[in-house]
Amino acid sequence: DIVMTQSPLSLPVTPGEPASISCRSSQSLLHRSGHNFLEWYLQKPGKSPQLLILLGSNRAAGVPDRFSGSGSGTDFTLEISRVEAEDVGVYYCMQGLQSFRTFGQGTKLEIK
Amino acid sequence: QVQLQESGPGLVKPSETLSLTCTVSGGSVSGYYWSWIRQPPGKGLEWIAYIHYTGSTNYNPSLKSRVTISIDTSKNQFSLKLNSVTAADTAVYYCARHENHRSGTYPLDCWGQGTLVTVSS
């Protein structure tokens, strides 16, 4: 099993300020294709999760460009350049390399 | 626009079988992988299983002995059965579609709204 570890688990942010979430995997997520099979999801309060980032750094359709993903191998980061009120929720990373999908514990972003 | 809708009993007795169906509208189940994911109240996400429209499956090893996932392409539905349930299986259950990305990855690009299943006598 690939274990996904996120930090921090709680992230209070002032609107307009940047935010950063770390995700580490117990095994490299670098596929033979050269892509990292790492995804980021946001679960807004009371809603289903939604795809933000795939392949470690590619924004999904309709995702604002204030969201960016980076990293390779076992260390990944989700950054929000300027947090807005609508960004509150729980952010999850998930590995897509193994058939047995595993999620990080989640990082709860809240507005200060 | 593809939409997914979970359906099934909201209350299941301990030791019985939880059965859920996901109905896909606005698109076809054919050509895709489909997953079930669950979320216990106040906790994180746990992937349960996926099925390809051809019928190939993969399961979470921790649940494999109790889970069956199936698909009915004629009804545009796929289903989940989890037997011998306990209170630990109480959760919101989501169905989701895996996008066929050109890079060979399959992110979860479309989710149902989720359905709460409570295990209690």
Image (cartoon, rainbow, N blue to C red):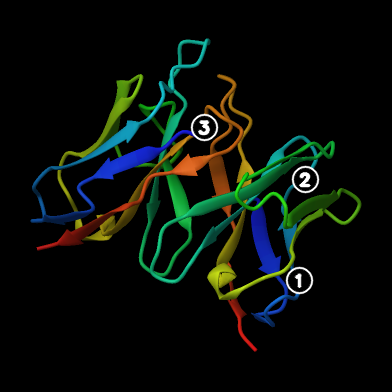
Q: Do discs 2 and 3 belong to a common subunit?
A: no
Which residue is identified by label 1?
A: B17
**Residue A48 falls left or right of residue A17:** right
What secondary structure is marked by label 1? loop
Pick whichever, B18 or B61, lies toward us.
B61
Which residue appears at 52% of the width and 27% of the height?
Answer: A97
Q: Is residue B113 visible?
A: no
Name the image quarter holding the C terminus of chain A.
bottom left
* A4 up-or-down from B90: above or below: above
Question: Distance of mark 2 from mark 1, alpha carbons?
Answer: 25 Å
Which residue is identified by label 3?
A: A96
Residue type of the residue flagged with mark 2: Val
Question: Distance of mark 1 from mark 3, alpha carbons?
Answer: 29 Å
Residue type of the residue flagged with mark 1: Thr
**Residue B40 falls left or right of residue A84:** right
Which residue is identified by label 2?
A: B29
Q: Are marks 1 and 3 in contact (CB under 8 Å)?
A: no
What secondary structure is marked by label 3? loop
The circle on residue A46 is none
Q: Nearer the viewer, mark 2 or mark 1?
A: 1
- Residue B95 placement: quadrant: bottom right
Q: Nearer the viewer, mark 2 or mark 3?
A: 3
